[in-house]
Structures are given as structure tokens and as C-alpha cells.
Image: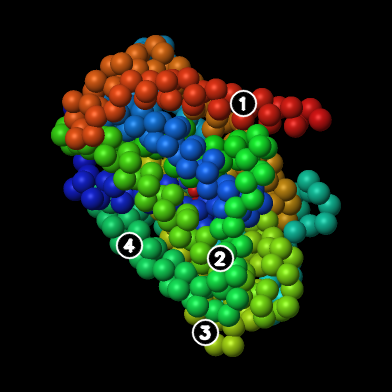
Amino acid sequence: MKLREQWGSKLGFILAAVGSAIGLGNIWRFGYMVYTNGGGAFLIPYFVALFCVGISLMILELALGHLTKGSAPLAFRKIHEKSEWVGWIAVIAGFVITTYYNVIIAWSLYYLLNIIAFGLPNDPNNFFFNDVLNISSSVGEIGGFVWGVLVSVIAIWAINFFIVNCGVKKGLEKANKISIPLLFILVLILVFRGITLPGGLEGVSWYLTPNFAVLKDPEIWINAFSQIFFSLSLGFGIMIAYASYLPKKSDITTSAFTISLLNCGFSFLAGFAVFGTLGYMAYATGMPLDEVVSQGIALAFVTFPKAISLLPVGSVLMGVVFFFALVIAGISSSVSLIEALVSAIMDKFDVGRKKALTLVTVLGLLGSSIYATKGGLYYLDMVDHFASGYLLPISGVLEVIVVVWIFGGERILNYVNRLSEIKIGSWWKYLAGILAPLVLLTIISLDIVSLIN
Ligand code: PHE
Ligand code: NA
């Protein structure tokens, strides 16, 4: 039997896991979630979700991977023969996400190259929807390929292939050791620029001013929990695979806290960049703040570029920093999604890394190409909703049932406490075993209800 690959250092593992967690979602999704869910008050359910469920499940996934030394399907098989399929659901759900996640990174790359070559677009709305996406007017029509996007998608898959092909230590670890510190620097530049602009501090105070009335709204709580699950990359077997490459003596609990806190700290920080810059836009255009903010993908691809194009100097530089940050945040996440499936295939079929990866890349490219058509955005929205609204919570619930209920929460608890400086109490069993699945089931039911209505 071949020896399992290992991280070169503890820091390398932490950076890779943080790289998975910090992604496109942290840069634009967190910001508009805060804004649309009551401003600063959203941070209350957000941190409740982080401490009650996010960190608990992070401990669960890391412990499972470390204990079994296996990717998700193998890990589940080792603790309960009949549950291997739960692991497959997780990694396949992750694969579905990769197919469109890589397309959003590809838009960012395309945007980045355009800014470098031609400067910021005069009309970002027209540029993004007509030049980049080339959306067809009839909803649901696939239409032809949008070549610029397709070529960028191929480039993104090629970069992923290159990194994952180099293996755990020379590929994933090395890439993240460079890109994560760089990412923090890029975001600090954006934060500094954002808050020092005229109007910047107004934008920030608007980002953080709480409206406590919203805490009565259950939807806000659901949004906070969903954001935490997705943001911490939970439910796709990623943290299981990453922990399976740790050496025997590893402090699981401390790692879980470190990874989760760095991820959420990064989101919080990125909010200053986004809202500081939007505050400037309000100042420069004389428009009220809530009219300059937009939701969804338009925030990153239309509004933010519009805001920086108003700068008297340095707007091209800011555009480059912003889209470069999106690209590296995205890639360090997509390599983790790919690794989760590649390692599952390697564990199961006893094939080498290159073979497994080639298979995943070819299928992935085929999947991604659907979203590089004129009707692509429509399909992307649909699949995103399906994957993060159903697949992710379903795979989370199954994971908890097998690990906490069948295998035994007590055993996991004893296992991590033997390894860690920080000892966790039996409260963990209730949070991971009962609260987490209840929240996930609520998310699924609300989605079904809204589907029916
Ligand atoms: N956590 C990443 C983000 O917030 C996305 C992601 C989800 C990555 C699931 C891997 C798995 O953008
Ligand atoms: Na990332």
C-alpha cells in the first residue's frame, strides 16, 4: 500500500483550509448579506451561527478525516460500512458546485485581463451583461457559446489541474502559502483605499449600523446559518480530505477554531473595502447609499467597478487588485472542491492522482461549458440554488446522523480531546448532533415551501 500524502507543516494545512473557506463568497456575498439583513445587527445571528454550528461541524469534519485517514467516502465506510454513499453524495455535491464556481472565477479573470488591456469599462453594466456574459434575451435558451468566457473557463480549469496535479504538499500547500498571505494584502489595500476616500466612513458606518428589529425575523437567522455553512466549506467532504493528510499528532480543536475565525474575520474585513468604496460612490454621485448598493453578482461585477471608475486617480490599479483578489480567493477554494473528489476516487479505485484528476477535469469542463453559453447565467442560478439550498444541507444532515448518532458523538469528543489543548465539553454533542441538523432541516423545508408557493 502506498503511504498517504501529508502536509509539510501545520501552517501549510491551516492556510490550505483557510484558502478553501475564503472564497468568492467572502468578498461580495457576505457584504450584501449584512446590508440586506439589517446591517450590523446581522453580525449577531452570524456569530451565533459560527459559534454554535459552524465551529462544531468544523470539528466534526476535521476529526472524521483525521481519525480515518480517508477522503469522505472512505471515512464514512470506515466508521460505518453501509454509509459510504453519504461520502459520495458530499463530494459529488461539491463537484456540481465546482462546475459553476469555476465559471464565476472565469468571469473575474476575463474582467481582470480586460482591465489590464483596456482599462476599466465605461459602462460596467453593459460590459458585464452584454460583452462578458453576452446573455440571450430568451430565458432558458442555451444559445451559442460565449467564447471569451469559455476560453477563460478552460484557463481556470487548467490552473486547477496544474495545482492539484502537483499533490498535497507541492501543489495545494504551496499554492495556498503564496496566495493566502497575498490575498490578505490585497484586501488590506482595498480596505485602506475604501475607508480613506471621501464618504468612505459613512459607507462603513452604514454597513455596521444595526437595526435590531430584524432579529425577530426568522429569515435573517436562516440566512446567517446558510452563509456560515457555505463560507466554511462544510458538507462537501473537503475538511475531511484535508484533515486526512495531517500527521498523527494534530490539534483538531484549535485548528477548527483558527480556520473558522480567520475565515469570518476575512469576511468582516472585506466588508470595509466594499462599503467604504460604495460610500465614496454615494458621495461622488450624490445618490443616497441604499440606491448605490446592489445585490447578487452585480455587486462585484457592476457596482464595485462603477464605484472605482469614479476615482480621479488609480482606478485601474484598484480594479486590478479587486479582480485579482477574486481570482485567487476563488482558485484556492476550487482546488479544495476538486481535491475532495480526486482523493475520493484515488482511495476507492486505487488509481493515481493524475488519472483521477484527468477524469474530474474532463467531466468538470463539460459541466462548466453549459454556463459559458448565452443562457448560462440562468442555468447557473438554478444549479446554485439547488446545490446550496438542497444538496449542501442534505449532505450535512446525513453526515451528522452517521457520525454523531450512529458512530457516536462521545467517541469523537474523546478523540479530539485526547489530541487537543482546548478541551470541549459534551455541549458539543448537542450542537453538532441536534442543533445543526435541526437548522439544516429548517433550511431545506423553507426552500421547499418557497418552491411550492
Ligand atoms: N467557502 C467558499 C466561499 O465562501 C466556497 C466553497 C464552498 C468552497 C464549498 C468550497 C466548498 O466562497
Ligand atoms: Na479560497
Type of residue at label 2?
Answer: Val
Mark 2, residue position: 204
Q: Mark 2 or mark 4, which is nearer the start of the sequence?
A: 4
Q: Quadrant of the C terminus?
A: top right
Q: Position of residue 327 (x, y in %)?
A: 48, 61
Q: Position of residue 315 (x, y in %)?
A: 55, 81
Judged from this view, the residue extending furthest toward the front is 212
Q: Mark 1 or mark 3, which is nearer the start of the sequence?
A: 3
Q: Circle 4 sits in a helix, a strand or a loop, which is it?
A: helix
Left or right of 428? Residue 118 is: right
Mark 4, residue position: 181
For residue 366, say whether it is visible. no
Q: Nearer the viewer, residue 359 or 34?
A: 34
Report the residue at 32% width, 57% height from top. 175
Q: Quadrant of the N terminus?
A: top left
* Label at residue 442: 1
Type of residue at label 1?
Answer: Thr
